[in-house]
Amino acid sequence: MMTKPYTVAVVQMAAHPNDPLATAEAAAQRLREAAAKGAKLIVFPEALIGGYPKGASFGAPIGMRKPEGRAAFARYHAAAIDLDGPEVALLAEATTQTDAFAVIGVIERDGATLYCTALYFDGAKGLVGKHRKLMPTAAERLIWGFGDGSTLPTFRTELGTIGAVICWENYMPALRMHMYHQGVSLYCAPTADDRDTWLPSMQHIAMEGRTFVLTACQYITRAAYGPEHESALGDDPEKVMMRGGSAIIGPLGTVLAGPDFSGETILYATIDPSEIMRAKYDFDVTGHYARPDVFELVVDTRAKPAVREI
C-alpha cells in the first residue's frame, strides 16, 4: 500500500443520455486529463453512461402504463450499455494508457433489465469488477433491477482498499458496515443527489468509517434531455437539472475539495494514507469500537439468479 501522499480526483460532468458512446469518449478524455495532473484514483458520477433520467415519469401513474412510457423505456434501454461493448473498451483503454484506477457509474443492460452499476477499472487490468445498486430509490425501482450481494466487492490496490456505494445506498447502515468490514480506505460515492444535505452525509460516512470519501455528481441542464422530462422540469433549456456538489472528504470529516455547484469541472485533492490510522486511533467501527457480543451483521454474498441450473 502506498504510504506517501498522492492525488485523487472526482469528475463532475454531464452525460449525453441518448449517446452512451459519446459519453464514454468524454469520460475517457476527462480521465486522461485528470491523470495528466497526477490523479491516481478518479471517480465519476452515478449513471453517467446511459444517463440518470431525472424528472422522467415513464408514463406510470398508479395502476397504469401509458404507451409513451413504454416508448421512453425502450429509448432508455437502447441507451444503456453491455459490459462487452465499445464504451467499456474505451474506458479500459484510457485506464491502461494512464495506469489510473477509475470508478464510473453506468446503466448496465442485462437482457431486458437495467441496473444502475458502478464499474471498477484498474490500470492495465482493465475492467476488474462491478457493483450493482442494491436498492433503487423510489421511482428508480420502475426502471432498474435490484442488485444482489454478489456485487459488493472492494479492491486492494497500492493506493488502498477501494469500494463504491451508490447514492442513497449510502443511507443503508448495514451496507456501510459491510464496506468498513472489508477495510475500505477510499470510499467512492457516485451520486445523483445534489442537495445541500448530501455533503454532511458524506462527512458523517468519512468519520464513521475513518475513510477518505470521494463523491461525484453530474452537472446537467435541461437542454440535454428529451420531451419526457418537460412536465417535471419545464422547457427552459438552461434550467439546471442536476447541479453537481461533488467533493472529497478526509477521514476526520474535513472537506478537502468542493462541494462545487458552478458547472462541469474536475476536483482534486492530495491525500495522505497515514491519516487513516491516525483517525482510527479512537474509533474503529468494525474493530475496537464494535460490540460483536451485542450486534451481529450477516451478509449474503451469493449471486441470486432467477433461474439456476444444477
Image (cartoon, rainbow, N blue to C red):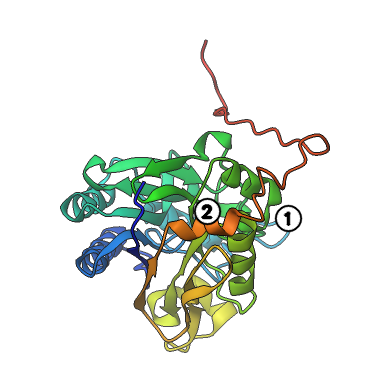
The numbered mark, 1 or 2, whose residue comes first in the sequence reads: 1
* Residue appearing at x 63%, y 30% in the figure: 300
- Closer to the camera in the image, 63 or 47: 47
Q: Report the amino acid beneath label 1.
A: Gly
Image coordinates for residue 76, horizontal then vertical, percent: 44, 57
Image coordinates for residue 288, horizontal then vertical, percent: 69, 44
Image vertical order of residue 130 relative to residue 248, above or below: above
- Label 2 neighbour load within 10 Å: few <14, some 14-19, many 20+: some
Image coordinates for residue 156, horizontal then vertical, percent: 40, 41
Secondary structure of residue under mark 1: loop
Image vertical order of residue 15 relative to residue 105, above or below: below
* Distance from the alpha carbon under mark 1 to that under mark 2: 53 Å
Secondary structure of residue under mark 2: helix
Kindly identify which residue carries mark 1: 63
* Residue appearing at x 56%, y 41% in the figure: 147
**Quarter of the rendering containing residue 84:** top left
* Residue appearing at x 55%, y 81% in the figure: 233
Q: Report the amino acid beneath label 2.
A: Met
Residue furthest right in the image: 294
Kindly identify which residue carries mark 2: 277
Image coordinates for residue 278, horizontal then vertical, percent: 54, 58
Q: Is residue 298 left or right of residue 129?
A: right
Residue furthest left in the image: 97
Q: Is residue 125 left or right of residue 288?
A: left
Q: Is residue 184 left or right of residue 4?
A: right
Label disc, if present, on residue 260 of the rendered structure: none
